[in-house]
Image (cartoon, grey):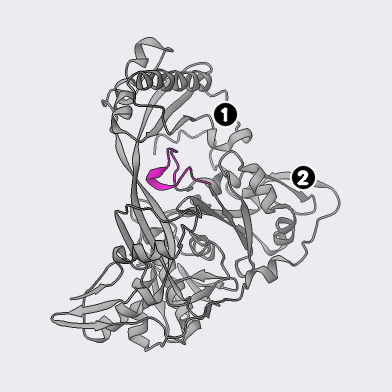
Amino acid sequence: VAIVTGDDIMAQLAELRAAGTVDLESGRGLPEQALSANAYLGAFPIARALERGAEIVITGRCVDSALALGPLIAKYGWQRDDLDQLAQGSLAGHIIECGVQGSGGITTDWRLVERGYAEMGFPIVEVAADGSFEVTKPYDTGGLISPATIAEQIVYEVHDPGRYMLPDVVCDFTQVELEQTGPDRVRVTGARGLASPATYKASITYADGFRLRTTLLIIGHEARAKAERVGAAILDRVQRVNVAKGLGAFRATSIEALGSERYFGAASQAQATREVVLAIGASHDREAALQTLAREIAPAATSMVQSISGFASGRPNVQPVVRLASCLVPKSLVTPHVTIGVDQLAVPPDSTPEEVLPYLSQVAEDEPATTATGSTKLVPLRWLARGRSGDKGNTANIGILARSPELVPILQARLTAEVVKQFLSHLVLGSVRRYPWPGLGGWNFVCGDALGGGGIASLRMDPQGKALAQILLELPIAVPLSLAVSDPDPDPDPGRDRGRT
């Protein structure tokens, strides 16, 4: 058993603060009181442990893909300058790092996964010495391995696909190609590698007050309006009690009428729904202020609108908020070590990492878009593309992949960053940037300040942006009448009771 250490950088925080290091998202200085601080290590310490005979390697913080790249380095003897192989190996790890998400567990065209969710087969990557690989899964298991399901996993939690930063290599995934080579088998090629960066990314956690979230069920005519009024009344009452006690106002509050398509904003088609779940959230510097809110939820059932229910499970719990800050740490401040028994081996990072990297993706983005001419019709984006979204702190990415090459120029012209920003403006408060992904026939939209703080710091029911792609796929897009596009996922039996299977 080998142990990889060196990721803990708590002792280096003072030096980083003195050097003016800032949070990558907010631009603010690093927190003064940290709970943890860890650099994301790479794959070479894992490889060195395996080369020295380790059968099990336990690591501190490392990038997810390193768990696959490390064994590949050890197996094939890849060196630090075998950049394309390192990029391909990293991509292999990226595809399988989220388990069955890479084998059809999460896909836009969910009906195509005919046998699945109860018996999903985990994805397997079979990697050759040149870095090319095929993705498959165990025989006679559920799930689906296809170019579409693999592509959706590739775009997950990536920002610039031409410059995906990892400790061992900077990956250019823009020209990745996918080929179906057999049932539940896809060949993946085309990842390119650039020299590794001069820094590690690090995550720092720190305490930042408390939060409470709870839900109530409200049924009947104008359920959304009733829910929003109830939520506002509860928060107003608690706020007045807390101010009277000298506890002060809430730091932030949230009222969500779930079931009324609240997450679709102005595009909601269910505002008149007769059944909603009212989600109430609040944050405060002091736990006692939120305990007041916990006590005031159930009384709403006897003093506000009819049909309030769903509070029988008891008072909600107050949770401490642990917030995340991310920063870049010079590799000179971090030295990974591998320990096997009494032996310890230092694994220093690259001796000559690149300080400045080419910005590959901007070249393709600057190419002019082809605008369709003639008569058009409006269809939802999901008819034209697949999508996948996820988070990096308070930033979300949405990967959009055209369903056919002929749709790429249409979407290039009409699905701009400005259009996405406007459609999601009720959720995305920061900027939106579009990165082209020509190999997969799509784009990656990186949305800043999009998750209400992200993770446990957010009061939203979707704090990690998992639903953003599904929301964006309802965006109306004008396409030429000459394109015979149709709903790719029609309900095969609209009259069937889906509650019975």
Q: Tell me which corner region of the image, top left, top right, bottom left or bottom right, holds residue 9.
A: bottom left
Quadrant containing the N terminus is bottom left
Q: Is residue 327 left or right of residue 379?
A: left
Question: Which kind of residue does numbered mark 2 sit on?
Answer: Lys
Question: What label does residue 270 carry, if any?
Answer: 1
Q: Quick one: 500 or 69, which is closer to the camera? A: 69
Task: Count every numbered label the image shows and give the total.
Answer: 2
Residue lying farthest to the front in this orientation = 18
Question: What label does residue 149 carry, if any?
Answer: none
The kind of secondary structure element at disc 2 is strand
Q: Residue at 33% x, 60% y: name it.
A: 37
Instruction: Pick whichever of labels 2 and 1 is earlier in the sequence.
Output: 1
Is residue 157 in the magenta section?
A: no
**Could you tell me if residue 98 is visible in this image?**
no
Q: Which residue is mark 2?
A: 377
Q: Position of residue 333 (x, y in %)?
A: 36, 74
Q: Position of residue 36 (x, y in %)?
A: 30, 57
Vertical order, 283 against 470 (above or below): above
Q: Position of residue 334 (x, y in %)?
A: 34, 74
Q: Tell me which corner region of the image, top left, top right, bottom left or bottom right, holds residue 317.
A: top left
**How far apart, in angstroms, are the residues tagged by discs 2 and 1?**
23 Å
Q: Which residues are magenta?
A: 450-463
Vertical order, 12 against 192 (above or below): above
Is residue 459 in the magenta section?
A: yes
**Could you tell me if residue 264 is visible in this image?**
yes
